[in-house]
Amino acid sequence: MKNYIIADEWSIIEEGFDPHYHQISESIFSLGNGRMGQRANFEETYSGQSLLGNYVAGVYYPDKTRVGWWKNGYPEYFAKVLNAANWTIIDINLDGEQLDLAKCEVISFRRELNMKEGYLKRNFRAKTAGGKEVEVDAIRFCSMVDDETAAIRYTITPVNFSDAITITPAIDGDVMNKDSNYDEKFWDEVSKANQTDGGYVVMRTKKTGFEVATGMKFSVLQNGQVVEAPIEAIKKEKYVASKITLQAQQGQSISIIKYVANLSSQNYQPENLVEQLNDTLNRIVTKGFDTMLAEQAAAWAKKWEHNDIIIEGDVSAQQAIRFNIFQLNQTYTGEDDRLNIGPKGFTGEKYGGSTYWDTEAYCVPFYLATADQKVTRNLLLYRYKQLGKAIENAALLGFKDGAALYPMVTMDGTESHNEWEITFEEIHRNGAIAYAIFNYVRYTGDESYLADYGLEVLIAIARFWSQRVSWSQAKRQYVMLGVTGPNEYENNVNNNWYTSTLAIWCMDYTMQVIEKVKASASEKYAALAARINFDEETETYRFKHIIQNMYYGYDEKLQVFLQQDGYLDKEQILVKDLPAGERPLNQKWSWDRILRSCFIKQADVLQGIYFFEDRYDIDTIRRNFDFYEPRTVHESSLSPCVHAILAAKLGDEARAYEFYLRTARLDLDDYNNDTEDGCHITSMAGTWMSVVEGFGGMRVRDGKLSFQPFIPEKWSSFSFHIGFRGALLNVKVSKDGVHIKNASATQVTVVVFGNEHLVEANGEVIVKNS
């Protein structure tokens, strides 16, 4: 665990430069705006260890998998968001010496991610080998207003010399992904050009044929005044730059303002890309840097109005929750139903930037409560539009009659994962997609979605489950063989409790929705049934028979649900008895040893209890929590938040707070020694859940918001915003009680500590602690 980020309520701050932490910081200080983003690479040259990363949402490449692609049913490729043209470059040369912090003496260094206003600021003083000392101030942001653009202001001041300084802003498209399976470069050059005050490069992806035009315009200022200086145009393969040399005076600043745009053929005709690129650049240049920065602050202020969480009395916890919310908002805005939420967002390449079940299980609750209803609807539509591909995926594995298996990893609906075990066996992702539909309707009350889209998806998923189970003559029950649950430290197991529970719930919920749609939109139901050849009587009869005869593992002595068959045959060692030097297991143990151990990567049985907690009494929840948590190593970022929520429900304040900090500061403190690969964006939604559903005890029951809050001892209060069916509530929990303000014209009934309260339009309710 690292501890070098300075605690601050609104900023992420790094004081001093440690090259060993540099790639971690590149992840943590990343920027994005939902349409594009980049890691916090330096503008000037850096020859030390670095992962250069610039990404454009939705642009991907099908990189042939390393294993199994020649076998039936294996994914042929791993779809991944591509490292795109590097637009941050501003090379600095000091009369023949290149400014490079890997080679200079770094006298002082400060980096700040201002989350309140949405920009990255860096200041440093450095001395070259030749003794030249300079001070640099740099600020940049990805615009939330003009979401295909970014801007940089880079100011350099000679401290102890007067001499020539050469500034070279550039666009470099000759990049490759660190995670390229065969060290292949994925881009071909289409065109490039230098312009009077900038230039552009247009690149096309191999195979998929996406085109991206990346362009820049710039101006140079000396002592605050725009200067006209000779420009040397540089053009190489996939690269354009402009070299400007100025005579610098000691103590006098030189600034370059660099405006950048990334336009994709997803949104423009390829033949119009350059024209549209220049129009976009001209528009933002006309605005100017200061106006763009002011617009950025206003856009972020509006976001924080709706999704800020305020924690009083604990700066570390406050910083962490805002960091997680900030990164979520940088990654996904919900404006485009073709886009989704990659586990690393725009902060790194691990997991390929593709869509996983994380979105449905963890991100949906966050967006439901903090964004317009259409944002979550677009996440659901993303899956609906890929239903045909999900049916094709299932057919490749031998399923038929419209059964759908959604992919574990995807960009366009095709299964595209490097690891066959997870691809084939971790079928619980199907259930997460069905659960997201249920969660959306439960929260919003938008039952029209079921008739228009949701039921078709649910039937296809239920068909899959009905074919995936097997009848056991020995047990005289249905069983679920050869699966991997959320706990990926168990592969190819039988009767994973979570997967079986989710499958049965899916079939039952599908039948409930059938009845709803038949009653509310009978014509739509009839048309759907005819189109997908749904024989309701025959197929629901099978659903019911499976539901009534499903096998679940249960230990009578311990009175806990068995994670899977044979779990208790493993040597039962607790995590507390593991030597610290042997963790994380996935970096210290062989895979064989992990599979034979009882250790759990992430919530598995407890994930199911979290989803369906209303089914279980508090004693059942406690027994399972107390059994499984001590065996869980939390080496998945998705694990601590579920444990925090359940611990809070059980009134276990100490463990709830411990798990909250672990999920909230997972990247800031590099808990699992993997932040250098990118931040854990999807699990960041779990941090929000830990506060709102954990400490706030928020649930939706019978169409009403319900709260059962408690406050951690270290906090004096905490508050959060909830949008619910047209109402916008601010809920503040303090030592004295719960204060709910309604900042909307829609009245709403809420339940606090089991009692109903009507919160009038623009009114408030105070519930005192007894």
Image: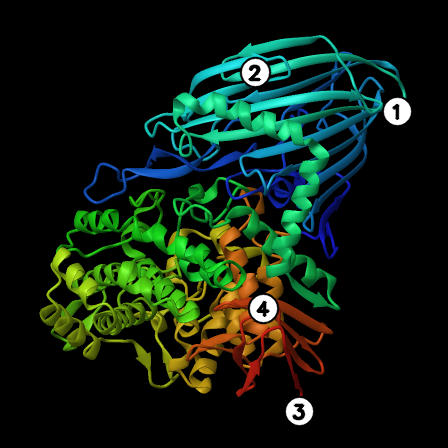
Give the secondary structure at mark 1. Answer: loop
Identify the coloring.
rainbow
Task: Say which element carries label 2.
Answer: strand
Nearer the camera: disc 3 or disc 1: 3
Q: Is residue 380 above or below residue 503?
A: above
In the picture, measured across the screen, residue 185 lies left or right of residue 419, that is: right
Secondary structure under the numbered disc 3 in the rendered image? loop
- Cα distance between the residues tagged 3 and 1: 64 Å
**Left or right position of 318 against 132:** left
Q: Earlier in the sequence, mark 1 or mark 4?
A: 1
As shown in the figure, which amino acid type bears the numbered disc 4?
Ser
User: What amino acid is at disc 2?
Assistant: Val
Q: CA distance from mark 1 to mark 4?
A: 55 Å
User: Which residue does the image show at 50% across and 15% down from the upper left?
Assistant: 192
Looking at the image, residue 712 lies above or below residue 525 = below
What residue sits 44% from the left and 66% below the top? 603
Amino acid at dot 3: Ser
Question: Depth check: 574 or 709 in front?
Answer: 709
Which of the numbered marks, if any, corresponds to residue 240? 2
Mark positioned earlier in the residue sequence (2 or 1): 1
Camera-side mark, 2 or 1? 2
Residue 620 in sight in this render? yes
Where does label 1 land, which residue? 159
Task: Tell me the CA gap for discs 2 and 3.
Answer: 69 Å
Residue topped by disc 4: 744
Residue position for label 3: 770
